Amino acid sequence: MASQSSQWNNNTAFLLAATGSAVGLGNIWGFPYKAGENGGGLFVLLYIFFVITLGLPVFMAEVFIGKKGKSNPVTSIETLAKSSKSSSRWSIVGYGGILASLIIAGYYAVIAGFVINYGFISASGVEAGAAAAVYEAEKANFWEMTFWFSLFLFSSGFVVANGIDKGIDKAMRFLLPMLFVLVIAMVGYGAVAGDFAKGLDYLFSWKAEDFSAGTIQAAIGQAFFSMSIGMGTLMAFGSYMPSNQKVSKASAVVVTADTGVALLAGLAIFPLALGLGFSPNAGDTLVFVTMTEVFAQLGAAGQFIGPLFFFLLAVAAFSSMISILEPSVAFLSQKHSMTRMKATSYVVAFCFLLSLVSVAGHNVWNTLSVGALDNPFEAMKYFADDFLLLLVGTGMSIFVGWRLEKVIDADVMGIQNKFLMNLWVFILKWVSPIFLMVIWTLGNLQILFGIRFF
Ligand code: PFF
């Protein structure tokens, strides 16, 4: 039977699992295209700024809730609310996280399925100039997309069903080293075959004219998504932390690795794209159209390097997908006393249905708009990434800053310096809730009602 243990059996498991979660499509697919769309350097600097000032503190808050509550996102919050004499309704933050994770799973699997498919497409070679047409054809194929996402979803479910040590930890020990080797190899190739100086300049040069409120929103949203904040994953993984592991140190390691890989992904993609004369501001088709075109231009070398690139993306997506399934599996197995196998089957079945809707959003339902959103796929992405994520992040920040102030213990956190501890609590109490809610309101007004303030 699947392992039901509720603690990692070693000290590196959390680091590996949380890094595997954080480093995903968000880093290699999302970060470069968002940097490209938002003018390069300024976006990157804002991104790093928000990672340090808002992301890391809220990341630590989420891990803290898990570590202290020692259970799934909902039960952890209920336990801590009780011990701090707060309302049990705070559990809504945990439910919000689980809901976000399920919706993300629904569309994430579809993009990952696309990635696997593209591994094969690029291996068989795409003719120069044909990448855009190939993308349109692939997107239109409901059954093919369903086949690839199912393969991806069921394999990640298999790992999760096997428990945290025999499933997740074991898989991460194998996936993460591979991921780092692949990303470094891609950067190396980009430096040789592309224009590294141009790529570096694109990634880091300051283009003030591209600054807008949208850039700030994009940078914060991307930072939270990339660090896996606000979906219950960090609470779940934090709950399995051995007692002697410190939240602050572990969080800093994961956040640094995540940011490092996002920058490396930029350094793998931009030199190649720019070096071969393509603009990297194609939006979310950067990886599937622009990069496929780049590989097509590279001829025979592209048939080798292209699949390697998509394999890297698939590995990153797989380790993240495992972590996206965990909060709801932990919730069902711990709160509703199911075996992990049964809990995973329910979760995977539910995500399968969501993924079908998400696939349909690319083809049969691609003109079925949901409110202001173009199709069901965009609607799911919007509701999870732009609506729920910052809301849950704000909820956790307020909960830890205002309700748990008395239970925060320096030892669990690993913060002995009084100034740093006060700074962390101050950010959670004031800075992140106010800032996140302003950004959330502005962003949603713009997306839903087209209202723009600046
Ligand atoms: N952080 C992952 C990425 O950058 O692709 C995505 C992700 C993982 C989102 C885990 C949500 C989650 F719970």
Image (cartoon, rainbow, N blue to C red):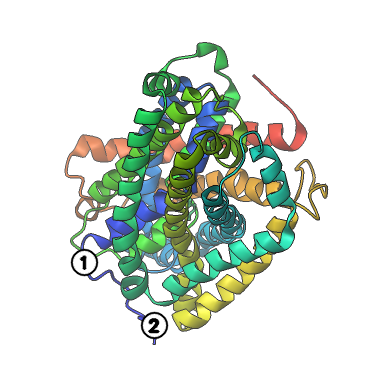
Q: Residues within 10 Å of mark 1 (few under 14, many from 20)?
A: few
Labels 2 and 1: the sequence-earlier one? 2
Mark 2 sits on what residue? 2
The image position of residue 6, as x and y in percent, is: 33, 74
**Quadrant in which the C terminus appears:** top right
Q: Is residue 433 visible?
A: no
SS category of the residue bearing label 1: loop
Give the amino acid type for the residue marked by disc 1 in the picture: Asn
Q: Position of residue 5 (x, y in %)?
A: 32, 78
Q: Quadrant of residue 136?
A: top right
Separation of marks 2 and 1 at Cα, in angstroms = 18 Å
Dividing the picture into quadrants, the one containing residue 282 is: top right
Q: Residue at x 67, y 61 (%)?
A: 144
From the viewer's perspective, tell me whether residue 47 is left or right of residue 180. Answer: right
Residues 110 and 424: in front is 110
Label placed on residue 10: 1
In this rendering, the count of numbered labels is: 2
Check the image and name the residue furthest to the bottom: 1
> Which quarter of the image is occupied by the N terminus?
bottom left
Q: Position of residue 153 (x, y in %)?
A: 55, 66
- Up the image or down, 341 lies above or below 164; here it is below
The location of residue 104, given as percent across then percent down, is 57, 55
- One can see residue 406 in this view: yes
**Residue pictured at 82% horizontal, 47% vertical:** 367
Residue furthest out toward the top: 209
Query: What label does residue 392 carry, if any?
Result: none
> Which residue does the image show at 46% across and 20% down from the upper left?
42
As drawn, is 215 to the left or to the right of 236?
right
When the figure is inspected, residue 155 is found, relative to residue 258, above or below; the finding is: below
Quadrant of res 84: bottom left
